[in-house]
Amino acid sequence: MIGTIRKHSSWLWWVVAALTIASFVWWGASPGTRYGAGRAGGYGMLYGKPVTLEQFEAAQREFMIYYWLQRGEFPDRSANFTRTDLERETYLRLMMTAKAKELGVHVTENAQATAANEVLRGLSRSGQPPVPMSQFVERILAPEGLTAADFQRFVGGDLMIQQLVQTLGLPGALLPPEEATRAYDHDHQEVAAEAVFFSATNYLAQVTATPAAVAQFYTNFMAHYRLPDRVALNYLEYDLTNYLAAAEQTIGKTNLANQVEAEYQQHGLAAVPEAKTPEEAKAKLREVLLRRGAAAMAMKAARDFVNPLFAMDPVKPENLVWLAKSNGLAVHTTAPFSEAEGPAEIAAPTELVDAAFKLNADSPFSKPLPGAEAVYVIGLAKLYPSTVPPLSEIQSQVVADYKYFEGAAKARAACTNFFVAATTQTSVGKTFAQAAQAAGKTPLVLQPFSLSSQEVPETEGLADVRQLKNAAFTTRPGHVSAVEPTSDGGFVLFVQSLLPVDEAARTKDLPVFLAQMRRNRQMEAFNLWLQAEANRELRNTPVYSEMAGGKSSANSP
């Protein structure tokens, strides 16, 4: 199974960090549109030389592969990634590789082959052989018009950028061990603390939900109850399982067996990483080939249906239902769904949901859409514009929300009162536990935790770990923390003491911690260079002119 690259693939670390941070430091955020066609005009200058169409397109294709490895989708599938974003990243890549070449960076074929193999290994399951290059190209790159040559160029470019980071970020890596030790102690010194939590659920019984109060709450939070745009679909489902027998007959048992054997001989167990034996791998390959044939048959049947559907005049949403019934086909209808949720009735691919929200009275049908288990033909059943339901329809929900909201307010008030009482009582010699007992509370004793802790088990579901750290490490030992509000109330901590750093753990962890700090400082130094270089060098590119002038990239040719 091909997935996004595993984050521990070491050779990519520099590039991941460099390009991720670069996205934030270059010129800031800007508006834009989904990327589309290239520029009819020039592509600007870099280091005194014109950027050619071939260079620009090659760098853009390399970035698309990089984006997929990090996000599991190509940029054009991301709703938040605009054409301006793509052009910005393309020019950044062009600039960095040009600087690397200027500095004499050269990538050997062996280094490139090793890095490419590491990427492919990162796409396979742990302990499995690398994903075959042919499979990666066929399943991931080719559908986007990308090639093995693009991937090879991407790997070489990233290796050059890696060397550039190491070279230009070197001053930041000169970090003395003593500074790393201090930083380690700061991050890993643990605190012993107790906590008292106040939750809305303990105060719900004190809330009276009068009709007037509920109505006012509904009015104040009306935007919260707004339903998004929704759509209901009529659809035909061409289930792949209905075509498996026909696919086997068409392919032929002997031919199918030969195809399975050929595929296995070419890739071995790597062709099906989840298989443990040759027999299991061949069985899965047989299933894949059959489903591929079944999918082709299902798609043909769907196209045979939509061809006359699109030819019907006048165009009406009801045409799909009428034509399906005249052909003896079952039409299904979804419940209304939003773009964020998708239909509950089917395992809809992203393309189906996208297509559903482009349907309208003038264009009520979509082309056949392939899914994992079926091919779908969809048509508009009804559009539901965004609306706020009247209070009468959602009365019980609003009442529950009102009571919870008021309960949380009462919990925070109680927490504040407790803070005042606990602070007073501990200042005159009483313990935090005694102060809590006087308020009818039992303190929760927390396991020691530090700034580097990812969780505090006892408080799961009660407070965010960042809030706990903030309360603990901004409060002097022997004192009560300030009130920390939570979504359903609040809490206070009593900091008992700061514990000594575990010297054995420090001795063991410090080498890795030091190396990580040096890498971080190296990236900081590199990004200082990158920001200055981009702000100077990329002024002579079209995308900078657009961003600086506030023009939408939609107006670009």
Image (cartoon, grey):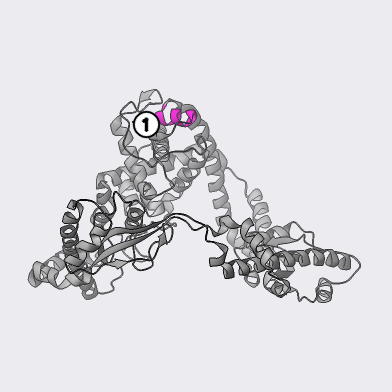
Give residue 106's quadrant in the image: top left
For this orientation, the residue located farthest to the top is 48
Above or below for 397 versus 469: below
Q: Is residue 343 left or right of residue 266?
A: right
Mark 1 residue type: Ser
Asked if residue 229 shows in the view, the reply is: yes
Q: Secondary structure at mark 1?
A: loop
Residue 348's spot in the image, x, y percent?
A: 33, 63
Give residue 498's quadrant in the image: bottom right
Above or below for 113 versus 479: above
x 48%, y 28%: residue: 549
Q: Specify the segment rendered in magenta.
A: 541-550
313 or 33: nearer the viewer:
313
20 or 489: nearer the viewer:
489
**In what quadrant of the picture does the N terminus appear?**
bottom left
Q: Is residue 384 magenta?
A: no
Q: Is residue 370 left or right of residue 544?
A: left
**In what quadrant of the picture does the C terminus appear?**
top left
* Mark 1 lies on residue: 556
Above or below for 223 versus 405: above
